[in-house]
Image: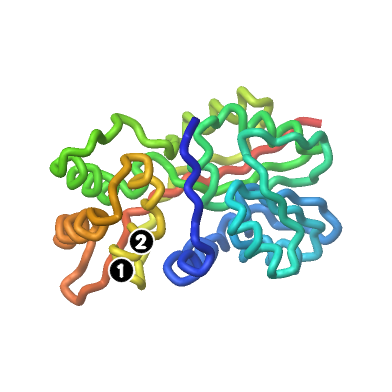
C-alpha cells in the first residue's frame, strides 16, 4: 500500500497556494450549477470546494489527510476523511470534481470505478492532476541526491503521472464516455522557492526512505543546488516543470 502524504495546512497555504489558484481552468470545465450535488475528491483545505459552494452547489469534500479535512471544515465546509481509492457512494452525485489530487491515489482503477459508482447516470467527472513528465527535473534531482547519499531509492514512486492515452483507457475501462483528455505543460512559478516546495511536497518521500531529520536539510540543500542551473533564472526566480493531465468524462445514461 502506498504511503499517504500528510500535509501541514499552514505550510501548504503558505507555499502551495498556487495549486488551487491554478485550478480555475478545470473549475471552468466543470461549470458547476446551482443545486447540483458535487463530490470534491481530494478537497485538501477546501479553497476550491468553497468556490463550488459559492456557485450554489451542494458539495461534499473528501480527503485522506485528516489535517486538511479539518482545515476545510474550519471554512464551514462539509468534508470527510476518506480514501479516494475506497469510495462507497452509490449514484448520488451530479458531478465529481478533483484538482491536483488523483496522482496521490496510485490505484487508478479503484478510483475511477468508485467515481463512476458515485455518479448518477449522466453525471460528469472533471479533473486535473499531475500528468506524464510532471516535475521530472525535480524528481530526478532529488532521487539523484538521495542515491548519491546511499539511500535505497525505489525504481517507482507512489505518485501516478499518466499519459492522456493511459487516462482515457482507464476511464473507459471504468465505464466512462470520455469527452476530452489532454496533457498540458505548465511551467509554474514557485514564489517561496525550491526548498519550500521540497519541504511541502516531498516530506512523505523522505519518510518512506527513512531519511533521518539530521540529513534532511542537507538533502534539500543539495537538491536545490543541483536544480538551480535548470529551474532558477538569473534573477533568482524558481520555476517548477509542472505537466498537468486534464479530462472531462460522463457516466452513460
Residue drawn at x 56%, y 59% as measured from the top left:
25
Q: Nearer the viewer, residue 152 or 15?
A: 152
**How many angstroms separate mark 1 from mark 2 (CA)?**
7 Å
Q: Is residue 99 left or right of residue 253?
A: left
Residue drawn at x 50%, y 47% as measured from the top left:
129
Residue drawn at x 53%, y 38% as measured from the top left:
105
Q: For the residue carrying disc 1, how many other residues have a C-alpha within 10 Å: few (<14), some (14-19), or many (20+)? A: some
Among the 4 quarters of the image, the one containing residue 241: bottom left
Whether residue 18 is situated above or below residue 38 in the rendered picture: below
Residue most extreme to the right: 35
Whether residue 227 is situated above or below residue 55 in the rendered picture: above
Residue most extreme to the bottom: 235
Q: Nearer the viewer, residue 111 or 31?
A: 111
Q: Secondary structure at mark 1?
A: loop
Tell me the quarter of the image containing the C terminus.
Answer: top right
Q: Is residue 151 left or right of residue 58?
A: left
Where residue 171 sits in the image (x, y, percent)?
60, 30
Q: Nearer the viewer, residue 175 or 15?
A: 15
Q: Secondary structure at mark 2?
A: helix
Where residue 204 sits in the image (x, y, percent)?
40, 47
The answer to whether mark 1 and mark 2 are in CB contact below 8 A is: yes
Among the 4 quarters of the image, the one containing residue 28: bottom right
Residue most extreme to the top: 173
Where residue 161 sits in the image (x, y, percent)?
42, 39
- According to the image, what is the colour scheme of the structure? rainbow
Which residue is denoted by mark 2 in the rendering? 197
Which residue is denoted by mark 1 in the rendering? 193
Where residue 123 sits in the image (x, y, percent)?
77, 40
**Numbered circle sitting on residue 245:** none
Residue drawn at x 53%, y 46% as measured from the top left:
246
Amino acid at each position: 500500500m502506498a504511503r499517504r502524504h500528510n500535509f501541514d495546512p499552514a505550510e501548504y497555504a503558505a507555499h502551495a497556494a498556487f495549486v488551487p489558484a491554478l485550478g480555475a481552468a478545470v473549475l471552468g470545465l466543470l461549470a458547476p450549477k446551482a443545486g447540483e450535488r458535487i463530490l470534491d475528491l481530494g478537497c485538501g483545505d477546501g479553497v476550491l470546494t468553497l468556490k463550488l459552494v459559492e456557485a450554489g452547489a451542494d458539495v461534499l469534500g473528501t480527503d485522506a489527510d485528516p489535517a486538511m479535512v479539518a482545515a476545510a471544515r474550519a471554512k464551514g465546509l462539509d468534508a470527510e476523511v476518506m480514501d479516494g481509492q475506497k469510495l462507497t457512494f452509490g449514484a448520488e452525485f451530479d458531478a465529481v470534481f478533483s484538482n491536483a489530487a488523483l496522482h496521490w491515489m496510485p490505484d487508478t482503477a479503484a478510483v475511477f470505478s468508485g467515481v463512476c459508482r458515485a455518479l448518477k447516470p449522466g453525471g460528469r467527472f472533471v479533473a486535473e492532476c499531475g500528468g506524464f513528465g510532471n516535475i521530472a527535473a525535480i524528481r530526478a534531482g532529488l532521487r539523484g541526491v538521495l542515491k548519491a547519499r546511499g539511500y535505497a531509492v525505489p525504481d517507482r514512486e507512489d505518485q501516478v503521472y499518466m499519459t492522456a492515452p493511459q487516462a482515457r483507457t482507464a476511464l473507459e475501462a471504468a465505464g466512462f464516455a470520455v469527452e476530452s483528455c489532454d496533457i498540458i505543460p505548465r511551467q509554474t512559478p514557485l514564489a517561496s522557492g525550491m526548498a519550500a516546495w521540497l519541504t511541502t511536497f516531498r516530506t512523505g518521500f523522505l519518510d518512506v526512505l527513512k531519511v533521518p531529520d539530521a540529513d534532511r536539510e542537507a538533502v534539500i540543500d543539495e537538491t536545490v543546488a543541483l536544480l538551480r542551473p535548470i529551474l532558477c533564472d538569473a534573477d533568482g526566480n524558481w520555476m517548477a516543470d509542472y505537466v498537468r493531465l486534464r479530462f472531462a468524462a460522463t457516466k452513460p445514461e
